[in-house]
Image: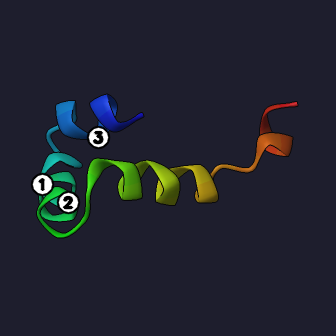
Amino acid sequence: MWWYILSDADLKPGGIKLKSMLSEMDISMLIADEIDLEDFS
């Protein structure tokens, strides 16, 4: 997921800003909190 954010031209600026404010582990936890597994079942 993180790779996708950094590889997408529209999302990359936001990804860079997040990376400058948070650790990669914190970003992963934020992304995981937003994903609802019931959406994929």
Does residue 5 appear to the left or right of 29 in the view shown? left
Q: Amino acid at mark 2?
A: Gly
Secondary structure category for the residue under label 1: helix
Residue receiving disc 1? 16
- What percent of the width, then of the height, locates residue 17? 14, 64
- The residue tagged 3 is 5
Tell me which amino acid carries mark 3: Ile
x then y, percent, for residue 23:
26, 57
In the rendered structure, which disc, 2 or 3, sits on the residue that comes first in sequence? 3
Quadrant position of the C terminus in the picture: top right
Between marks 2 and 1 in the image, the one whose residue lies nearer the viewer:
1
Residue 18 appears in which quarter of the rendering? bottom left
Q: On the picture, is 2 further left or further right than 29?
A: left
Q: Are marks 2 and 3 in contact (CB under 8 Å)?
A: yes
According to the picture, the residue beneath numbered tag 2 turns out to be 14
**Which residue is at 78% across, 41% downward?**
37
x, y percentage for residue 7? 19, 30
Q: Residue at left 39%, top 58%? A: 26
Residues marked 2 and 1 touching at CB (< 8 Å): yes
Q: Secondary structure at mark 2?
A: helix
